[in-house]
Image (cartoon, rainbow, N blue to C red):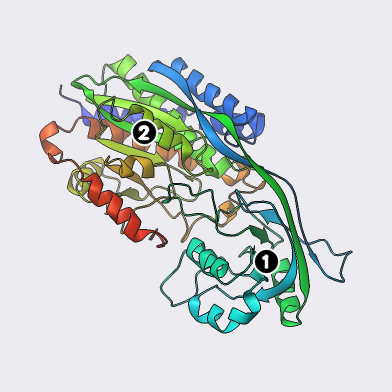
């Protein structure tokens, strides 16, 4: 099959811009449905909405797949300073924070690095620690998980981390390492407070104040869902590419950037490629599965359930591309989990003529839904964009109720959809001989994950 690439790509870009439904999808997911915490009614509605759009666009084998999710709910939380009962402090429990009621001295542990907590050993036993969630400047970065484990061994009963930015903001973080088998069982209760109240607590710690920290929470099980649909390949229908994103949110967030943006682009790429095949007879060379995952925010449980269910009964896909937080900035390229596909992907990016680049991650990235695929020995990728460094400042509201529709630039989502539709179509037409012939070694991957536990994944 010979593809007239200029004609096909012009059609895809024009359709992506002029006929876009991105605004409809973002508004439906965030405003009409709203919070989509894994296992909730909102998440069920989101999965069904996405499935129905896949069906509307003409994809085959559209479905939602249920799985049991380990979930969590906090019914109350508070921080109070002894002798200042009228003062209400900002507080937001970390995801999967266990219940705790503790009255103890508060100790400022800085960044929680070994050289900082060593001199505090006698004071930390039985204390509540105030710790920065940022990385200590100029030192090799340590994950928050490792620092919390260090404090737990010194007898700390709970930790408080201030939000980095001002304006009394807080967000739901996570104390676990998603490379672990059970990342939701954490070493210490962790709650977040605002930058302003963090500074107040630091002042009170300097004067020897006592603090009471209370969290009432419970872990339960619920039913979560993945949504999917297929576009059959015309040349190698038994070979597969996967384009995915998560449709769930944290417990009180409408999740516009994280991750209605990614789910919307999955829907738009599916629409563009299905319409190109239907109207112009230009289909993918190998089959493409479009899938959105539930319960990503609960430790990648949706993508892990998907990988466990499908591989290996189904053929292993050639490549999985994960879309997450696309509101942070325009597309700059592709980042691979493993290096083997770099020449192939860069060749196709060069052919697109948009100046996009392909890079390779220095570590196994467990922060998104590509990780369960990579752990299984499947080539995985995410998009290179200004996610953390140089990103749009008004998207710095993740995991909070302020991650609203106004934080997403629909114009950029249109460009993402057009670029990705072109890239997925091009990659689908690469011949089997262009791909690595040797499978990835899952034993080596497992050893690498264990070795890298606690390391901080580079995003630049």
Q: Measuring from the top left, give residue 192's x and y in whole percent.
A: 66, 59
Find numbered disc 2 in the image and state the secondary structure of the residue it sits on. helix
Q: Is residue 47 above or below residue 146?
A: above
Task: Kindly indicate the quadrant of the structure image that contains residue 280.
Answer: top left
Q: CA distance from mark 1 to mark 2?
A: 39 Å
48 displayed left or right of 6: right
Q: Measuring from the top left, give residue 130's x and y in whole percent.
A: 65, 70
Q: Is residue 1 above or below residue 265?
A: above
Disc 1 packing (10 Å; few <14; some 14–19; many ≥20): many
Query: Which numbered dot is residue 195?
Result: 1
Find numbered disc 1 in the image and state the secondary structure of the residue it sits on. helix
Camera-side residue of 8 and 53: 53
Quadrant in which the N terminus is drawn: top left
176 displayed left or right of 404: left
Q: Is residue 317 above or below residue 115?
A: above
Disc 2 packing (10 Å; few <14; some 14–19; many ≥20): some
Q: Check whether the beta carbons of the residues at disc 1 and disc 2 lie within 8 A of each other.
A: no
- Residue 360 visible, this orientation: no
Instruction: Please report the residue visible at 41 percent of the width from the left and 73 percent of the height from the top.
Output: 140
Q: Residue under label 2, please give it.
A: 307
Residue closest to the far bottom: 119
Q: Measuring from the top left, give residue 311's x and y in whole percent.
A: 31, 30
């Amino acid at each position: 099959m010979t593809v007239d690439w200029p004609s096909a790509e012009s059609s895809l870009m024009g359709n992506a811009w002029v006929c876009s439904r991105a605004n409809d999808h973002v508004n439906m997911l965030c405003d009409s449905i709203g919070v989509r915490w894994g296992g909730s009614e909102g998440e069920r509605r989101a999965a069904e909405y996405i499935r129905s759009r896949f069906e509307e666009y003409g994809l085959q084998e559209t479905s939602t797949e249920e799985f049991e999710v380990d979930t969590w709910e906090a019914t109350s939380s508070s921080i109070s300073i002894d002798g200042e009962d009228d003062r209400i402090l900002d507080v937001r429990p970390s995801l999967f924070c266990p219940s705790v009621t503790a009255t103890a001295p508060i100790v400022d542990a800085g960044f929680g690095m070994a050289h900082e907590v060593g001199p505090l050993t006698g004071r930390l036993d039985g204390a509540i620690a105030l710790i920065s969630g940022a990385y200590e400047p100029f030192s090799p970065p340590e994950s928050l998980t490792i620092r919390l484990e260090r404090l737990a061994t010194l007898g700390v009963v709970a930790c408080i981390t201030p939000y980095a930015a001002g304006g009394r903001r807080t967000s739901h973080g996570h104390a676990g390492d998603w490379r672990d088998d059970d990342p939701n069982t954490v070493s210490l209760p962790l709650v977040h407070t605002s930058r302003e109240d963090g500074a107040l607590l630091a002042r009170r710690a300097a004067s020897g104040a006592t603090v009471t920290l209370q969290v009432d929470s419970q872990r339960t099980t619920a039913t979560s869902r993945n949504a999917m649909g297929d576009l059959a390949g015309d040349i190698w229908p038994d070979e597969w590419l996967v384009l995915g994103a998560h449709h769930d949110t944290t417990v009180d967030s409408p999740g516009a950037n994280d991750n209605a943006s990614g789910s919307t682009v999955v829907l738009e790429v599916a629409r563009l490629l299905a319409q190109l095949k239907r109207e112009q007879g230009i289909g993918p060379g190998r089959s493409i599965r479009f899938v959105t995952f539930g319960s990503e925010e609960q430790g990648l449980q949706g993508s892990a359930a998907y990988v466990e269910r499908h591989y290996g009964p189904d053929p292993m896909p050639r490549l999985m591309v994960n879309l997450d937080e696309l509101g942070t900035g325009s597309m700059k390229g592709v980042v691979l989990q493993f290096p083997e596909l770099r020449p192939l992907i860069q060749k196709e990016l060069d052919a697109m003529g948009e100046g996009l680049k392909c890079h390779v991650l220095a570590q196994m990235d467990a922060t998104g839904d590509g990780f369960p695929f990579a752990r299984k020995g499947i080539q995985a990728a995410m998009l290179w964009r200004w996610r953390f460094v140089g990103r749009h400042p008004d998207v710095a509201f993740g995991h909070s109720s302020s991650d609203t529709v106004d934080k997403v630039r629909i114009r950029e989502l249109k460009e993402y959809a057009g670029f990705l539709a072109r890239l997925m179509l091009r990659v689908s037409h690469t011949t089997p001989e262009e791909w690595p012939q040797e499978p990835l070694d899952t034993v080596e991957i497992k050893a690498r994950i264990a070795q890298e536990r606690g390391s901080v994944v580079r995003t630049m």
